[in-house]
Amino acid sequence: MKKNFKTLKNYESVREDMKYISNSISRLKIIKTLYDMPSNAKNLNKNTNVGYSAISTNIHMLELAGYVYRENNIYYLSNVMNLYMSNIVGLSKTINFIDDFFYFLNNHYIKSIPSESLYTIGDLINSNIIVSDGLNIYETHEFIENTISNADYVNAVLPFYYAGFNLNINELLNDGKSIKLAIPTNIKEKFDNSLIKSDNLNISYFNKSNVSFLLISTDKMMILGLFKMNGVYDQNRLLTANNKDCLKWADSLFKNFKKDI
């Protein structure tokens, strides 16, 4: 009962904070600008188009409420307000990602992706979809092979065996590149028989029931493949990206997944 009461009090407090902030377009503009970068009054005026008088009044109110503080005439968001804004921005990115890539996510199983990575999946908003068609049914596999071949390192979750991937991995190992793999225990023997022995190769094993996605994470490209709800891997669609946020997300997903196996 005490826990429920505390949760209710916290909810009421956050709700009042959000209500106060969203009650004014000027306050929202000021907070969004300070979230992007601490600023003085002159830059706030320039970046928000809010008049000096309104900036002065709202900044004073935000300072009194503990949402903003000032050092050497530069205004900063408080830790609490930074946390609020981070959650709001993260939620917004996730919603936009789901809207933009609904047809990729729909009817696919994503629950085995660690919660830490699902929470930040909005970082993939600038990704692209590769879809195989009737003219080239192996387009997605060829894209993965080319990605591996051009990598300086590879971190990968490979939930199934495909000989072509291993040929590319062996080429990288011969060149002294770092390879980290997570594979199901039921195909361990196939990998053992097809990959060369190397100090640069690190393999972790997991129970097949614990995973329903394919991940290729390199220094240049991120690739995410999903399983359909019936448990069959969708070999016709890949989510791909080469920008910094997506590469960072993919490396984080690999680390989060390895923690759980």
Image: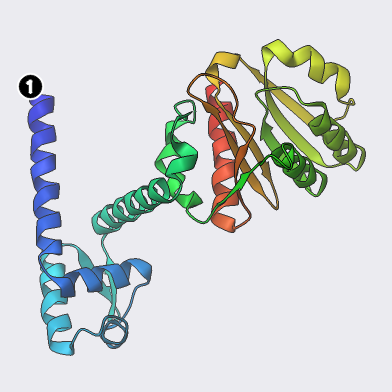
Residue 220, compared with residue 104, is above or below; it is below
201 lies left or right of 38: right
Which residue extends farthest right?
Answer: 174
Which residue is depicted at the point 50% across and 19% down? 230
**Split into 4 quadrants, where in the image is the C terminus?**
top right
Q: Position of residue 123 (x, y in %)?
A: 47, 51
Indicate the quadrant where residue 223 lies.
top right
Judge by depth and name the residue closer to the eye, 20 or 97. Answer: 97
Residue 55, compared with residue 235, is above or below; it is below
Indicate the quadrant where residue 227 lies.
top right
Count numbered badges in the picture.
1
Q: Secondary structure at mark 1?
A: loop
**Split into 4 quadrants, where in the image is the N terminus?**
top left
The residue that disc 1 covers is 1
Residue 117 seen in render: no
138 lies left or right of 54: right
Judge by depth and name the residue closer to the eye, 170 or 258. Answer: 170
**Mark 1 residue crowding within 10 angstroms, few (<14) / some (14–19) / many (20+):** few
Which residue is depicted at the point 14% across and 48% down? 14
Q: Position of residue 34 (x, y in %)?
A: 31, 71
95 lies left or right of 260: left
Residue 29, compared with residue 221, is above or below; it is below
Identified by mark 1, the residue type is: Met
Q: Position of residue 247 (x, y in %)?
A: 60, 50
Residue 31, compared with residue 239, is above or below; it is below
Which residue is depicted at the point 33% across and 49% down? 91
Q: Position of residue 190 (x, y in %)?
A: 81, 16
Which residue is depicted at the point 53% across and 33% down? 256
Indicate the quadrant where residue 115 lies.
top left
Judge by depth and name the residue closer to the eye, 65 or 183. Answer: 183
Which residue extends farthest front?
Answer: 134
